[in-house]
Amino acid sequence: MQNDDTYDLETLAVRAGIHRSQFNEHSEAMYLTSSFVFENAAQAAARFSGAEPGNIYSRFTNPTVTAMQERLAALEGAEACVATASGMSAIVATVMALLKAGDHVVCASGVFGATVQLFNTIFSRFGVQTTFVDGGDPAEWERAMTPATRLLFLETPSNPLTEVLDIAALASLARKRGALLAVDNCFCSPALQKPLELGADLVIHSATKYLDGQGRVMGGAVLGRKDLITDAVFPFQRTAGFTLSAFNAWVIMKGLETLAIRMEAQSRNALGLAQWLEGHPGIERVMYPGLASHPQHDLAMRQQKTGGAVVSFIVKGGREDAWRVIDATRLLSITANLGDTKTTITHPSTTTHGRISAEARARAGITEGLVRVAVGLESLKNLCADLERGLKA
């Protein structure tokens, strides 16, 4: 079903990836097993060699995980998907499977703080060097590329400033220079944005966020063409074991069923909140792609279905006043996670981006007055009233 383009995303979200057992269950089964039994020694040998398809060991083959991979691939329009234990492990699997010592990466400076750490500190130990660029200008990406550049990496919208990057333009640049383009689609999910349709080679997900949608489990995924995913990322995953558990895969799979309606409702709430904040005297600036005032609003409306569910804003007065706003909330959850049906609020400079250098934060535009709100499904009126407590002060 994942290859049938006659079905819409909402249909694929509840129907793709279903393989019923002999019991003919209606809800997807959960296979909590570490290993699988073979009919005989010959079958075991055939499975291990790859001559016969089938499950072997849940570190890399499990029916529940396979079902989740197929469903997500159907939603993204990908040929293949490998699920991982977290979003960060999805990035690690991608880089370790597709790059080698001496290769070069160009990465948007506005990516998630842990992603900056990963490229800047961890991968460099293994000989993969990274140049960070301000993502908005494709010409700057091209200037940063070298003959050794093998990967362009970006988030759009970015975390937490919601900067929107031109996927199609960067995909064209990557093809011209013989590199791959990987897009972290965490903020939008396939319900709002399809990077592969815009020319990207790879899509990265932290399934912990909107794919689960209720803040329950950790998970990640890498999607793209079979030659990249099945032939390269999967063999790495098989050996390295960045395994998504069957239970987590089942939870994410059930979350995908409501992805479209959640993203629509949360985006509607986010737009309303952004509009309210934009008119508030205590706010210096609001960053939300759905606002006409957003620098990349037109681009966002071309490559996204809505503005998404994340709103960032700068409180007048710096860190002390930003913390005052956060601490005054009674309804919003003070936590760095996002993608939940419950609205969350955090201070990026001291949480999600607290481990990167002050210089890197400044380069990314993450100021002390910045607050990020990931909007959930509560009443918009109640969310505004909760934020007003701190903004009044």
Image (spheres, rainbow, N blue to C red):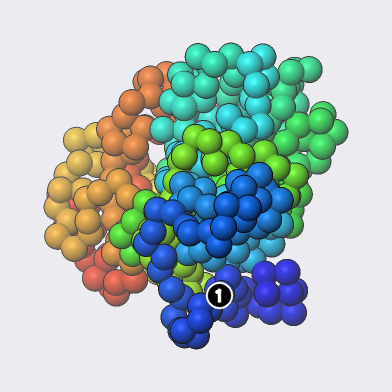
Give percent across and percent down for residue 175.
82, 37
- 43 vs 29, nearest the viewer: 43
- Judging by the rendered image, the residue that carries numbered circle 1 is 18
Q: Percent x, y for residue 338?
A: 36, 53
Q: Residue at x 32, y 33 (%)?
A: 349
x 51%, y 78%: residue: 21
132 or 209: which is nearer to us? 209
Quadrant holding the N terminus: bottom right
Mark 1 lies on a secondary structure that is loop
Q: Residue at x 65, y 26 (%)?
A: 99
- When asked about the image quadrant of residue 265, the answer is bottom left
- Tell me: residue 201, above or below residue 267: above
Tell me, yes or no, if residue 317 can be seen here: yes
> Where is residue 87 drawn, in percent x and y?
46, 44
Residue 29 versus residue 357: which sits nearer the camera? 29
On screen, residue 381 versus residue 270, left or right, reads left
Residue 39 point in image, percent of width and height? 55, 62
For disc 1, the neighbor class at 10 Å (few under 14, some 14 to 19, many from 20) is: many
Q: Residue at x 49, y 35 (%)?
A: 240
Residue type (three-letter) at the residue carrying disc 1: Ile
Q: Is residue 391 above or below residue 24?
A: above
Asked whether 240 or 353 is in front, the reply is 240
